[in-house]
Amino acid sequence: MSATGSPPPVVLCLNGPNLGQLGRREPALYGTETLAAILDRLEQRASARGVGLVRCTSNHEGELIDALERAPSAIGAICNPGGLSHTSLALRDAYSAFGRPVVEVHLSNVHAREPFRHRLLTAGAARGVVSGLGAYGYELALDAVLTLWGKEATPA
């Protein structure tokens, strides 16, 4: 609870297909840190900034979309859609319908990889994309969501 007795604002953190395999899956490309370790650190960073973190990791596109729909009070979202970023118009539409900042994260630099990974369907509906900075990208995405929330919550 905040000093006013209301729950702290929350940021939704979505992780798509195969991200549960981090630490074991292609460590030369994605590193050796597990998703749980990355998200634990992100949750600590969020807490230090007075916000909560709601996690959703799924290999199923619909579960990620449902999580966006079930989070009407979230101030924004961080999303690493994995391979769905190249294929999912439905997730892209969910970003748009969410109505708050979504910052997309890619651990690897997708533009330095195979040509089919260069096209990010979901990214066009995100407020920003962090790509190629490994796990640090999640921290930058959180900072971006909080900055955008602060600017949008402050009257011009």
Image: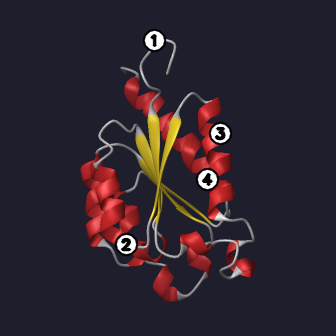
Spatial CA span between label 1 and label 3? 21 Å
Residue 6 percent across, percent down from the top left: 41, 19
Q: Nearer the viewer, residue 126 or 52?
A: 52
- CA separation in Å, label 3 and label 2: 27 Å
Q: Amino acid at mark 1?
A: Thr
How many neighbours does mark 4 have within 10 angstroms: few (below 14), some (14-19), or many (20 or more)? some
Q: Given contact means CB atoms under 8 Å apart, are the residues at marks 3 and 2 in contact?
A: no
What residue appears at the point 56 percent right and 49 percent down from the top-left corner?
Answer: 141
Q: Amino acid at mark 2?
A: His
Q: Secondary structure at mark 1?
A: loop
Q: Upstream in the sequence, badge 4 or badge 3?
A: 4
Mark 1 or 3 closer to N-term?
1
Between disc 3 and disc 2, whose residue precedes?
3
Percent x, y of residue 14: 46, 57
Tell me the CA gap for discs 1 and 2.
Answer: 38 Å
- Image mark for residue 39: 4
Distance Cα–Cα, label 1 vs label 4: 27 Å
Residues packed near mark 1 inside 10 Å, few (<14), some (14 to 19) or many (20 plus): few
Which amino acid does the dot numbered 4 rest on? Leu
Q: Which residue is mark 3?
A: 45
Residue at screen point 61% across, 43% down = 43
SS class, disc 3: helix
Q: Which quarter of the figure is the C terminus placed in?
A: top left
Q: Is residue 8 above or below residue 92?
A: above
Q: Which residue is mark 2?
A: 60
Q: Residue at x 28, y 58 (%)?
A: 94
